[in-house]
Image: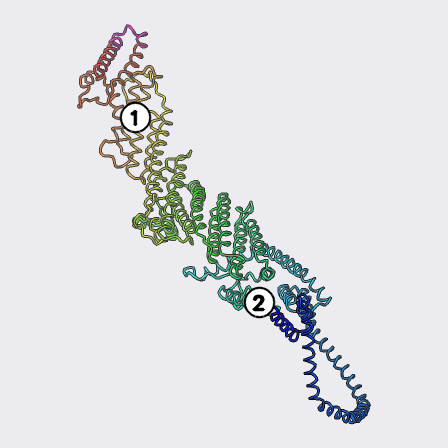
Amino acid sequence: MASVETAAEHERILREIESTDTNCIGPTLRSVYDGQEHGLFMEKLDARIRNHDREIEKMCNHHFQGFVDSITELLKVRGEAQKLKSQVTDTNRRLQDDGKELTSSMEELQQCRVQQRNIATTIDKLTHCLPVLEMYSRLQEQMRFKRYYPALRTLEQLEHTCLPRAGQYRFCSIMAENIPKLRTQIRDTAMTQLRDFLESIRKHSDKIGEAAIKQAQLQRSLDSSISTQPRALLGRRSRKEAAVAGGAGTDSERQGGSPVSEQDSGILDVEDEEEDDEVPGAHDLVDFSPVYCCLHIYTVLGLRDVFENYYRKQRRKQARLVLQPHSNMHETLEGYTRYFNQIVGFFVVEDHILHTTQGLVNRAYVEELWELALSKIIAALRTHSSYCDNPDLVLDLKNLIVLFADTLQGYGFPVSQLFDMLLEMREQYGEILLKRWNITFRQVLDQDNYSPIPVSTDQEYKHYTSQFPLQDPELEKLPFPKKLPFSEFVPKVYCQLKEFIYACLKYSEDLHLSSTEVDDMIRKSTNLLLTRTLSHCLQYAIKKKNVGLAELVQVIINTTHLEQSCHFLEEFISNITNVPPDTANATKLYGTSTFKDARHAAEAEIYTSLNAKIDQFLQLADYDWMAAVQGGGTLDASDYLIDLIAFLRSTFSVFTNLPGKVAQTACMSACKHISTSLMQLLLDPEVRQISMGALHQLYTDVKECESFARAGPVAGFQGDTLLLAFSDLRQLLDLFTQWDWSTYLADYGKPTCKYLRVNPHTALALLEKMRETSRKNNVFAQFRKTDRDRQKLIDTVIKQLRNLIAQHHT
């Protein structure tokens, strides 16, 4: 069994040796040597080799004849091959001889092809290098002519397009190294131009503002009643914006071009220059191209944020400088004009930049600047206008502020706070007007002669009636020459009142107020003029020293006519404001009360002055209180009293033009004052003794006064009303001169008493002075029975009077 397996294994190894590559036969042979039947395998291997040799031999025997035939054929071919070889050699020799010229030509052709290839390569390289050189040359030219934005575009094209195509050449490396330096140079130069631009607009802000204000003024003068679209100073904005918007989108696509052309800087369309050639625009004063160029350069460089921040920061600094007013700005209108022009110029430029650039400044930034400016403007105006005391300057300033506000409102800036401030300034303007009119009224009152105005011709009459609404048909019928009842200050004051109203109206113009608001404002200001200024001036004229009664009478007449003219002032205000006087809640003028108060003050001053004049006459009274009773004949009135009555007669003759009540009151006051003063003379403590002769003299003087009162120096008194002023003194003197004590003591306290107005205290005081006189006389005539009896009688009456006073007191 083992021999069979060994034989099978040897057979397998032999098949494997036959079928396996000799390089891989090693493992198979190792397995044979590792086994125990090595000899047996070698025998089988030899047997297998012999078997294969027999098969090879059989195969060779089978193909031997074919091999012999092939050798025979090959020998025959060798002869032919020799012939062919000699022919080929000969042919090759002839070909070599004939190909030498062709080879030479081919070498020449090859050389030409090499040269052609080199030329093509050179042309190709030059094709890539020449644009670089041309573009660099263009770049240098653009830098030389300061066309920096096209230079930057050229630089960008050179760096990203031309240089990569040109290859690695030394000049390309040099150019590439110079590109950052050129960018920096362009950036720095553009920034320098921007600084120059900022300095330029700072210097020209006032001119730009002046042009904008002139244009707004021209527009308003053409048609102030029509609300028009705000016209930009720099041209028609709709056209400009379309041009700039179109230019910004297309110019960037131009090769080497700038978004802003070199001629107009992309700012203005000049197609309407002929239309607006009377007002120069900002393009005539400032070249805006640097800011646009710098903006685009920084945009290309990726530094737009840096540029925007720098521009806004610098403009804020300039805004603070522009908004800082000069310390003496309030002195002249030119100072305010220059201040407003600079501000308008600043914001006109910002508005133009806002509408012609995309994002350099935005609406929020401009509004922030305007809010800052508005607060500083209002603060500056409040401060500087407070120093002004000239109403004309305040009015001019108001008109300038209105024009300033309208100009900026045309550019879309809110200006309501400016108009609110103008309403505040209205109060200041009113106070300044009141001060000026206070001076004017005082001058009018000081220069007046307080005499009726004489008119000799109808022309003079019409002149005065045109100044003052005098309506007196009876006066018109009188022939010339004639006199107007009032003095010069009436038409002058009335004209000044109208001038004040006109001045108030001028300030109210262009403040966008309704007619009712204007009417109310004028009426309130006029009321202040009447109740404060004119009233104080009239009081000053009335109260000042050396004002005579004739002047006071004329003041009363004048104020009466002015009071009557108040409704004409009401109509005048209504006519200029187009507001009916009967409008609900309309303010009424206080002129009537003002002139009434002045007239009452003048009347009181007349009474006071008349009494003072009477006192001057009474100071001349020189009574002999110890005068003896004159026997027989009549006493004459005292000289001072005769002069006083003569003065009163002449004075009351002047009162004919006064209202009847005033003249009557003055006359009654004068008579009462005379009666009271004479009574005070009797009761003067310094007069210790009074004789009956002195009482008779005083009785005569009172009688003269009653005669004056009875004559009716002033019309309008009923009956003996004026005599009542002297009734107290008359009854007292009658009691003493008639010595009717029994009647007085018996009827005292009764309504029908003859001496009803005699006060027992007054009678007692006078009796005691008479008793002193009697005692002094009795020292020398004590033996005269009549004197002793009179002394006893006086003592008895005194005792009875004291009892009477005591009874009534109890």
Q: Is residue 547 magenta?
A: no
Give me the disc on residue 504. none
Residue 589 percent location from the top left of the image: 34, 45
Front residue of this view, candidates 355 and 555: 355
From where the camera sits, is residue 389 visible?
A: no
Q: Is residue 784 magenta?
A: yes
Name the amino acid, label 2.
Answer: Ser
- Above or below: residue 73 compared with residue 426: below
Residue 237 percent location from the top left of the image: 49, 63
Front residue of this view, candidates 380 and 505: 380
Which residue is under mark 2?
252
- Give the distance between the C-alpha atoms of the residues marked 1 and 2, in whole angstroms: 111 Å
Residue 427 placement, left or right of 30? left
Which residue is under mark 1?
675
Instruction: Name the secondary structure under disc 2.
Output: helix
Quarter assignment of residue 20: bottom right
The residue at 55%/63% (across/down) is 267
Instruction: Name the secondary structure under disc 1.
Output: helix
The mark that comes first in sequence, 1 or 2, is 2
- Above or below: residue 605 compared with residue 808: below
Number of other residues with Cα within 10 Å of mark 2, as a class: few under 14, some 14 to 19, many 20 or more: some
Residue 13 placement, left or right of 483? right
Q: Nearer the viewer, mark 1 or mark 2?
A: 2
Residue 395 percent location from the top left of the image: 46, 50
The quarter of the picture where the C terminus appears is top left
Q: Majority secondary structure of the magenta segment? A: helix
Residue 402 percent location from the top left of the image: 46, 53
- Above or below: residue 121 compared with residue 769: below
Name the amino acid, label 1.
Answer: Ser
From where the camera sits, is residue 25 visible?
A: yes
Residue 70 placement, left or right of 749? right
Q: Which residues are magenta?
A: 776-791
